[in-house]
């Protein structure tokens, strides 16, 4: 059987052919789907969360909602209803109105036709109607109440899983609302599968302690060397290539990221002229690997450098509410990433370490207070969302008070880039401050 290289190795929106099951992840996920709890799949970006869903759930077994910074819980519930083809009309504030004419109630109430009502199609057409004439044909539900949503889904006897992709993009208050709603859904045996980019356990339990023992968490990390070897072996057999001369370095340089391993394998194959299954075995050489590493470093570099520049926020702001010049925490945070010992970054940076190191390099160290740094760290995810950094590359664990990189490709980039050169190209807020002082 012939395979296309990009279907065997790489990162795609569909399941890649070299996917391998891991007992600690796949078995736990399959078990979680059956135990009646809500399921939380988490880990760094490009570490196999979506692939886990694609491997173990058929498309007809679930509905999926892609979360965004603008998504509210109501939007999620409406999307679920639409995908399940549950017809509804919005409650109106007037007695006579257009059912789909743009007027929307300030609340979140909807009306659902009785299941089996033969007049459903007619009632939902875009025409002017008199509510009084259809009042008895509908049941009212409030989408702001998880109890109502649960009752509605149960009345339609839906057995599909509900997958929430990119949960981390939601604003914190929306995440908190959903954490409370999950408690209700679990009672009604409606199973949500939530995918999020973070690395600490019990993320949702921080919002609602009542979820303890009601959710099953499935971390997709860590990947170990044996896992990577199985992936490379499976893909190699499909394409009839041999990575034996470069496998050790390939895995080492990928920094525990399956996404990076997959991409380096793909680029190494294409550099060797392997675009599909070969008739004769092809040996992947050191030159092939070096070329792949260089290409991926350049490719990742474009995105990460742009993210750094957006994160720093080069808008010229000379003072905060107190009248003092800005402390420019985003700039000094990026400066730490580009100057700190790489091994320390891999382990994660504690809040105490961040405070100490930023004071060492800050132009006004006496003004760098723990409380100010804490406020910056607590808003870290939202700051990245506001700057359109997708996916986020760093996350702060409030419980453990430690900062971790959550974009698995960033380690690869930091190891292969010229960090000093990149830092020199990032605007320094101190230059802006001095310039303003000269003008004044």
Image (cartoon, helix red, strand yellow):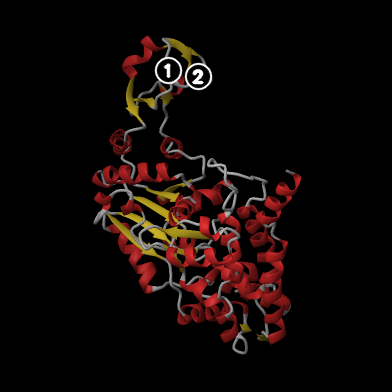
Camera-side residue: 174 or 183?
Answer: 174
Looking at the picture, how far across and down is residue 359, in whole percent?
Answer: 53, 63
- Residue at 64% x, 73% y is 266
Of helix, strand and loop, which one carries label 1?
A: loop
* 129, above or below 276, in the image: above
Question: Which residue carries the number 2 mark?
Answer: 103
Camera-side residue: 63 or 123?
Answer: 63
Separation of disc 1 and disc 2 at Cα?
7 Å
Looking at the picture, how far across and down is residue 46, in whole percent?
Answer: 53, 64
Q: Earlier in the sequence, mark 1 or mark 2?
A: 1
- Can residue 166 be spotted in the picture? no
Of helix, strand and loop, which one carries label 2?
A: loop
- Residue at 40% x, 46% y is 175
- Residue at 42% x, 40% y is 80
In the rendered view of the protein, which quadrant contains the N terminus? bottom right
- Can residue 393 be spotted in the picture? yes
- Residue at 52% x, 58% y is 366
Looking at the picture, how far across and down is residue 355, in whole percent?
Answer: 48, 63
Looking at the picture, how far across and down is residue 373, in whole percent?
Answer: 48, 55
Q: Residues within 10 Å of mark 1 (few under 14, many from 20)?
A: some
User: In the picture provided, is 389 more to the left or to the right than 293?
Assistant: left
Q: Residues within 10 Å of mark 2 (few under 14, many from 20)?
A: some
In the rendered view of the protein, which quadrant contains the C terminus? top right
Callout 1 touching callout 2 (CB < 8 Å): yes
Q: Quadrant of residue 248?
A: bottom right
Question: Which residue carries the number 1 mark?
Answer: 92
Residue at the limit of the structure toward the bottom, as seen here:
245
């Amino acid at each position: 059987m012939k395979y296309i290289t990009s279907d065997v190795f790489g990162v795609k929106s569909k399941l890649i052919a070299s996917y391998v099951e891991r007992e600690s992840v796949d078995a736990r996920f399959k078990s979680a789907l059956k135990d009646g709890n809500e399921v939380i799949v988490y880990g760094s970006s490009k570490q196999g969360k979506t692939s886990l869903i694609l491997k173990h759930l058929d498309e007809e077994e679930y509905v999926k909602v892609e979360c965004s910074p603008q998504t509210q819980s109501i939007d999620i519930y409406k999307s679920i209803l639409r995908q399940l083809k549950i017809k509804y009309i919005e409650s109106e504030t007037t007695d006579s109105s257009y059912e789909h004419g743009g007027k929307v109630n300030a609340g979140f109430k909807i009306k659902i036709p009785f299941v089996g009502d033969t007049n459903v199609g007619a009632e939902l057409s875009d025409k002017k109607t008199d509510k009084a004439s259809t009042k008895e044909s509908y049941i009212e539900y409030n989408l702001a109440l998880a109890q109502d949503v649960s009752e509605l889904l149960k009345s339609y006897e839906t057995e599909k899983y509900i997958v929430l992709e990119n949960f981390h993009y939601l604003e914190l208050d929306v995440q908190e609302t959903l954490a409370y709603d999950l408690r209700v859904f679990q009672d009604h045996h409606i199973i949500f599968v939530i995918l999020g980019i973070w690395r600490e356990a019990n993320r949702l339990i921080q919002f609602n302690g009542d979820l303890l023992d009601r959710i099953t968490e499935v971390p997709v990390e860590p990947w170990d060397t044996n896992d990577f070897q199985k992936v490379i072996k499976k893909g190699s057999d499909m394409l009839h290539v041999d990575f034996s001369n470069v496998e050790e370095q390939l895995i080492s340089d990928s920094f525990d990221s399956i996404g990076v391993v997959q991409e380096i394998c793909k680029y190494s194959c294409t550099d060797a002229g392997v675009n599909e299954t070969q008739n004769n075995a092809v040996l992947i050489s050191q030159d092939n690997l070096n070329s792949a590493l260089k290409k991926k470093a350049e490719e990742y570099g474009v995105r990460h450098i742009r993210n750094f520049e957006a994160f720093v926020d080069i808008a010229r702001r000379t003072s905060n509410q107190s009248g003092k010049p800005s402390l420019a925490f985003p700039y000094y945070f990026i400066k730490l990433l580009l100057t700190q010992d790489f091994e320390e970054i891999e382990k994660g940076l504690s809040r105490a370490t961040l405070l100490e190191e930023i004071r060492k390099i800050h132009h006004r160290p006496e003004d760098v207070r723990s409380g100010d740094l804490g406020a910056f760290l607590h808003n870290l995810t939202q700051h990245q969302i506001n700057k359109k950094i997708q996916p986020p590359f760093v996350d702060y664990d409030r419980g453990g008070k430690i900062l971790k990189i959550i974009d698995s490709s960033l380690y690869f980039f930091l190891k292969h880039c010229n960090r000093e050169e990149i830092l020199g190209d990032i605007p320094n807020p101190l230059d802006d401050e001095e310039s303003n002082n000269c003008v004044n």
